[in-house]
Amino acid sequence: QAQVVESGGGLVQPGGSLRLSCAASSSLFSFDSWAWHRQVPGKQREWIATITTGLITRYDDSVKGRFTISRDNANNTVYLQMNNLKPEDTAMYYCKSSLMGPRWGQGTQVTVSS
């Protein structure tokens, strides 16, 4: 099963930008879709974006037009470019693929606050 390391989170002011990275340890990386999810303490983890093997992307309405998911198969990495961040985007962000089985990574914290 693949393991991942998410990074790139931090503290940013409203309207700012961050780029999250998810480095995966699987040679099968390019053969599966990858997604980003996020979770706020006390709430269920929610899906926000997916990119397929054919580079088709889908987004939750809450991030559509502000976030962009992309992938680099040569480096086994998936990205989430987040622009025009809002306080309600504050959460722990996780990447996920079926290659990981039931596991999740440690996540990367994004805090949007002035």
Image: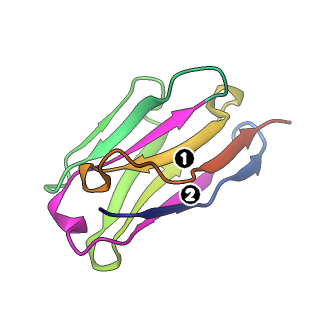
Compared with residue 26, is residue 37 higher up or lower down, i.e. above or below? above
Residue nearest the observer in this picture, 35 or 66: 35
Can residue 64 be seen?
no
The quarter of the image holding the N terminus is bottom left
Residue 71 in magenta stretch: no
Residue 66 picture location, percent across and down? 49, 38
107 vs 28, left or right, is right
Compared with residue 47, is residue 110 higher up or lower down, i.e. above or below? below
Range shown magenta: 16-39
Residue corresponding to mark 2: 19
Residue corresponding to mark 1: 82
Q: Secondary structure at mark 1?
A: strand
State how far apart marks 1 and 2 are (Cα): 6 Å
Residue 67 picture location, percent across and down? 47, 42
Can residue 4 be seen?
yes
Residue in view at x 86 percent, y 36 percent: 114
Residue in view at x 58 percent, y 20 percent: 43
Type of the residue with mark 2 = Arg
Residue 25 picture location, percent across and down? 36, 72
Mark 1 crowdedness (10 Å alpha carbons): few <14, some 14-19, many ≥20: many
Q: Number of labelled discs?
A: 2
